[in-house]
Image (cartoon, rainbow, N blue to C red):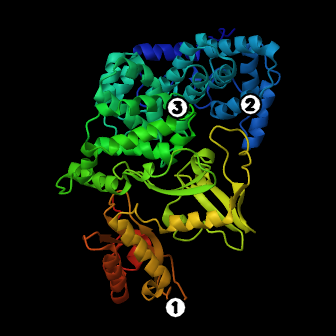
Amino acid sequence: MSAPAVPSPALYDQVRRLRQESPDGLPPGRGFDLPADSSTDLRTGFPADLPSERPETRLSRREMAGVVREALNPLPEDPATLHRRFAELGVRGRHRNLIGSAVAALPLPADEHATARALARQLTRTGSTVPAVTAGLALLTRLGEPEDVPYLSTLGLLRSLTGPAVQALDALDRRSAAVLWLVTSVSRGELRPLVRALGAGDDRAVRSELVAFRAEPRFLGATTARRIAEAARLPDLLAGHPADPALLARVARLLVRMGCASDNTTELLTYREAPAVYETVVTRAGLLPPTVEQHATLLSLALDLSSGPGVLLDWPSGCRETLLASLGRQLAEPSWTATATAGLAPEGPADVARRLRAGWIRRTGRRPFRRPAAPDMGLRVEIVAGDPVDRAPVETRVLVDGRPLVPAVFAHGPAHSPEELLDEGLLRAGPEPRRVRLAEAWCSEGCCGALHVTIRRDGDRVVWEDWRRPPPPGSRGPAPELPVLRFDATAYDAEIARAEEDRAWAWPARTVARLIKAGLVERPELLSRWDARRGWISTGHEEPDTAQVHFWYQPGLGAGRPEGDPLVFRWTVPDDGTPPEAQAAAALRRLAEEDPKSYSRVSGGTRKRAEELGYTWPFDG
């Protein structure tokens, strides 16, 4: 007679034990893994003694979603039934996203809420498998109450359950959700002291560590900034330190990073306390010292409030306009305008950063204050070059009735640059409809999509219609249809022409790159004679003072008979201080007279092809 099976331990109890054994109560890296001696099979998320009656099969995602729905319908009243159904139907831990989607779509009449909530609590507190506990977390996303927060916060420390737990906490307690996200997502040593202080709820340590950590872009993405703001309870922190310029500067920095267009553009809009924090920062901005760094921070906030995602926040009537005007007055004071002449003789990296920012402030400093902040009717196009030290992009911001279009309808990346939209004349309304890509996901269109619209002229109107975009993050269906936009054709043409002529935002190297590109568009033979064709030409974040000219080389290309795979070359043209027109003309003359492969470097293609053609492959590690 075999011994009775030992009940599998609850995942909640296992995570509590792991937390107690951790020196600081935090998991290493990105969350706890179940211990190797656990009775739970790490591959399936099931107890090792609970066999599956359905053999492993390769089902499509749609088929597996149907299986998950079958397991949940009808919703059982006891955890054992759900454990058994998941095991019999082959639902595994790796299907947790499908489980969450299925639970979110379950019809739950009000009179069944109490029963479903009781099941969810049993699953999360006593469940021994990842699929079952995931179902409990998903139910608590819909039905949870404050008493569930400690259990969710503990279960989320398990790597397999972090996502569902954070989602459930976001609906109940944004601070607890933020702390859990940071504890399990931030592994860089520079941020761990702050994360430990937030996890411990030590407000004094939170203030110290918040001010101390390095807030460079590589450490502080938009999502991390938003989660830090939520976890630190910034409104309370600011209220407790009303005359703390260091804290104020760091809070302003968090706002800037949340609004960063090169990252997830929804983060600032997701931060519920953003209007209140903006108001506190701007009204106390006089506490900040007038330095290049603080001028850049306040100017970045002004650009957001003028034409960026900050416009889309839920503002009390007139508040945003008042804050923008206040920033305009402060940055116009002599002590602040003087910062634009700082750092003109660079020596080290810090001096280079100050010089880049000072030049940006001179070009950009008054742009967000030139037009009234109140919404205006029709179309407006603003070219915004962000803080170069912050690696901010150059955007063609399209505003409709004063509201920025791209961040309002597309969460995955910024509007395209003026070189892409304006220099190519893509926003002009011609006799034939034209499909235009206004923005692309920061990863790529093939990964997370892009925002497309068709532009056409219809008599005395210009029409934007037939929008195409991916679903918003977290949605479970197609993106809602966007309305057709109609503009007065005369006013539209004038605004596009004005924007195309606007060059005041550009720095010398960017102008050099634009003029080289224009010259090659007009005279493609300058490259084709060398069996080459034009590639990407602009300036990069790493070297904003140089124009980067990329071209593709293929033997026989100039004669129309290209052979083999192409190689990509990069030619770097440093800004030598002479007028951009002269620099571009000299670059075009050199292309006409010398083979550019002789003074450029391979930057793409394959090692094999480079070696076949006699060039050094530069990516050797």
Q: Which residue is mark 3?
A: 271
Q: Secondary structure at mark 2?
A: helix
The disc, 3 or 1, on the residue closer to the chain's N-terminal end is: 3
Q: Secondary structure at mark 1?
A: loop
Q: Which residue is mark 2?
A: 102
Task: Decide which of 583, 190 is in the foreground and name it.
Answer: 583
User: Residue 5's quadrant in the figure?
Assistant: top right
Return the x and y of residue 377 as percentages of the image width and height: 63, 51
Amino acid on which the number 2 mark rests in the picture = Ala
User: Residue 589's quadrant in the figure?
Assistant: bottom left
Q: Secondary structure at mark 3?
A: loop
Q: Is residue 42 visible?
A: no
Task: Decide which of 137, 430 is in the foreground and name it.
Answer: 430
Amino acid on which the number 1 mark rests in the picture = Ala
Give the side of residue 523 with respect to residue 571, left or right.
right
Q: Residue at x 36, y 20 (%)?
A: 197
The disc, 2 or 1, on the residue closer to the chain's N-terminal end is: 2
Distance between mark 3 and mark 1 Cα atoms? 57 Å
Task: Give yes or no for contact between labels 2 and 1 (Cβ–Cβ under 8 Å).
Answer: no
Q: Which residue is mark 1?
A: 559
Return the x and y of residue 424 as percentages of the image width and height: 55, 71
